[in-house]
Amino acid sequence: MKKFQLGLAAALMLSMSACTSDEPQNEHPTGWEQKTITFTFGDVITQHTMTRADVTELDLTDLWMFDYVGGELQQTVHQSNTDEDFGVLSASMGYGEHTLYFVASRGTTPTTDTDAKTITWVKPSDTFWATATVTVSPSSESSKAVTLSRVATRLRITVNDEVPVGAAKFVIIPSQWYYGINYTDGNGIAPSSNQPREVNIPSSYIGTSGQLAIAIFGFVPSADWQTDITATLKASDESTLGQVTLEDVALKRNITTAYSGGILGTSKDFTLTADDTWGDEDVHTW
């Protein structure tokens, strides 16, 4: 009986020794190992061809990266133009394949919703977007250049009349306008109906002709779309000095749709020209 007890004790000691050995007992879960990847944004697509212009040269104010693995959000990285390293974004990323979404914008008061995968702005402005798939491993490169494409649309209205004394405000009311994007594809979301966009008129424009040009930015849903626009020139007491309604205004990504005409009169002559900054400009007169 004593020999059996000694043998059992020895077996227990060996078992305990095995449990406290220096050899790893379990592998780390997938993604535990990490590597820091740095992203730069030296190229953007501002026309139908690539242009060399980084996010600081475009006066953008916010930059986001949304990092997904297997459809699950791993992290969101945000920079603002007050950050010292704005435009050079670094993130620690676990080993494996990542799907990344990038958004750079100068819209005001952005709100992100990672459940809905959206960003909305109180006042949209120029906005760029990109997606990339990156496989992180010990041998993968630690830096990557990202090319951003413009996803904003722009409506520009030029008043050909002489701006009268007392003119104080220009109001553009689209029948529908998109104030945000889905950051996974850059398509417009969050439409609003008949929301006024107001711009104060500097006194230096009083008495000038063809110099007053008002532009508003927005976004386009998955397909090109049209909307009606009411443009009103107002005095400081809110009285109407002139008004025009533009029907079926077509808007596209990376396109300026430009109208010009006399808001104090009624001409309707439509022409089309080109722009060398954005995509081909869609230009009209009324």
Image: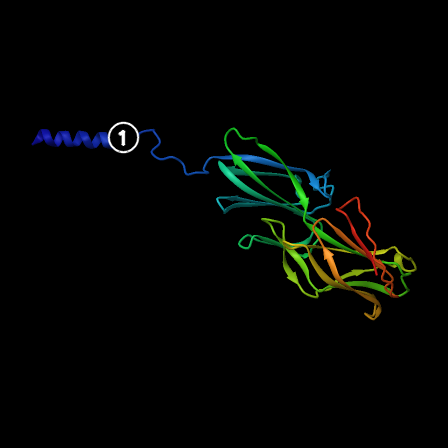
In this view, the residue in front, 226 or 112, is: 226
The residue under label 1 is: 18
SS assignment at label 1: helix
Q: Position of residue 122 (x, y in %)?
A: 67, 58
Left or right of residue 103, residue 161 in this image: right
- Res 235 visible: no
Please indicate whether residue 169 sits to the left or right of residue 35 in the image.
right
Residue depicted at x 69% and y 50%: 253
Q: Amino acid at mark 1?
A: Ala
Q: Residue furthest right?
A: 207
**Is 262 left or right of 191, judged from the image as shown?**
right
Name the residue: 78% across, 44% down: 277
Residue at the left extreme, as displayed:
1
Could you classify mark 1 by the number of other residues whose Cα lies within 10 Å: few (under 14), some (14-19), or many (20 or more)? Answer: few
Residue at image point 52% right, 35% down: 135
* Res. 246 image quadrant: bottom right
Q: Residue at 30% across / 32% down in the picture? A: 20
